[in-house]
Image (tube, rainbow, N blue to C red):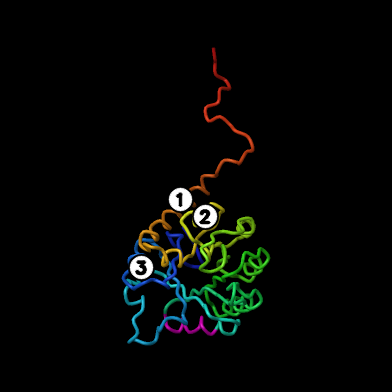
Amino acid sequence: MLKIGPYTFSSRLLLGTGKYPDLETQKKAVEASCSEILTFAVRRLNIFVDSQPNFLETLDLKKYTLLPNTAGAKTAEEAVRIAKLAKASGLCDMVKVEVIGCDKTLLPDPVETLKATEELLKEGFIVLPYTSDDVVLARRLQDLGAHAVMPAASPIGSGQGIINPLYLKFIIEQATIPVIVDAGIGSPSDAMIAMELGAEGVLLNTAVAGAKDPVKMAEAMKLAVEAGLLGYEAGRIPKKETAAASSPLEGLSVN
């Protein structure tokens, strides 16, 4: 089970809700993914305007935990304000902190991310900060009391997959809180690798929403996360530079 603060989940696939061609496709993809946590950008959702259609109206919200994110924030102050807006709407007290420091790469601002995380923890939020694959920053966020850290596999929406598996592995090895790989996942194999590294979950959006068949891709991602977790728990064989016969002759009588 995936445990984040006081919450417990069966699924380790967290799904974004943006970029789908229409709400019906989005609904079917969410159902196919079996995700229990859905994330969305508060700034891009008219949560207080009843006349504006949104995905909240198409889903049975009793089945899901909503994870508002602070996408669009450039400072800690903005991120905190957006998080409070989401909480005031009664959606959830869990928030993904996202404070972008570079418009080209969409990498997070580490200083403002730390500030926002610290402030929101004081306010009683369940905080999941989005970070780069910075090992030291992940530890600092953990030391502050973050309930999970969400390092990027590669730039948001790029589909490049995991470009620095070594740093992700370092983050995971030192973590005492869940590490959820976020951003840049492009294929089911990317999600599986993240889980094989020891991540406790994967968050993605574009890889499903932008696929030719989002519903099939959502199911594929679900299966990939499950397979990756099983592979990690099973423990892979060590890599060798030489061959090793799968049917060894040692101990057998050979004429």
Pick the front one: 139 or 151: 151
Q: Which of pointers 1 and 2 lies earlier in the amino acid sequence?
A: 2
Identify the image quadrant of residue 50. bottom left
> In the image, what residue type sits under mark 2?
Met
Q: Which residue is mark 2?
A: 195
Q: Which residue is mark 1?
A: 227
Q: Which residue is rendered at x = 42% and y = 81% of the image?
A: 45
**Crowding near the residue tagged with mark 3, few <14, some 14–19, many ≥20 C-alpha atoms within 10 Å:** few
Q: Which of pointers 2 and 3 lies earlier in the amino acid sequence?
A: 3
Q: Is residue 142 magenta?
A: no
Give percent across and percent down for residue 203: 49, 65
Q: Which residue is rendered at x = 46% and y = 50% of the image?
A: 227
> In the image, what residue type sits under mark 1?
Ala
| 84 displayed left or right of 107 | left
> In the image, what residue type sits under mark 3?
Lys
Secondary structure at numbered mark 3 = helix
Give percent across and percent down for residue 186: 49, 61
Numbered tag placed on residue 63 in the rendering: 3
Q: Main secondary structure of the magenta part?
A: helix
Q: Which residues are magenta?
A: 81-90
For the image, the number of numbered tags is 3
Q: Nearer the viewer, mark 2 or mark 3?
A: 2
In the image as oriented, which residue stretches furthest toward the top? Answer: 255
Q: Which residue is rendered at x = 65% and y = 74% of the image?
A: 110
Q: Nearer the viewer, mark 1 or mark 3?
A: 1
Q: Which of pointers 1 and 3 lies earlier in the amino acid sequence?
A: 3
In the rendered image, which quarter contains the C terminus? top right
Identify the image quadrant of residue 117. bottom right
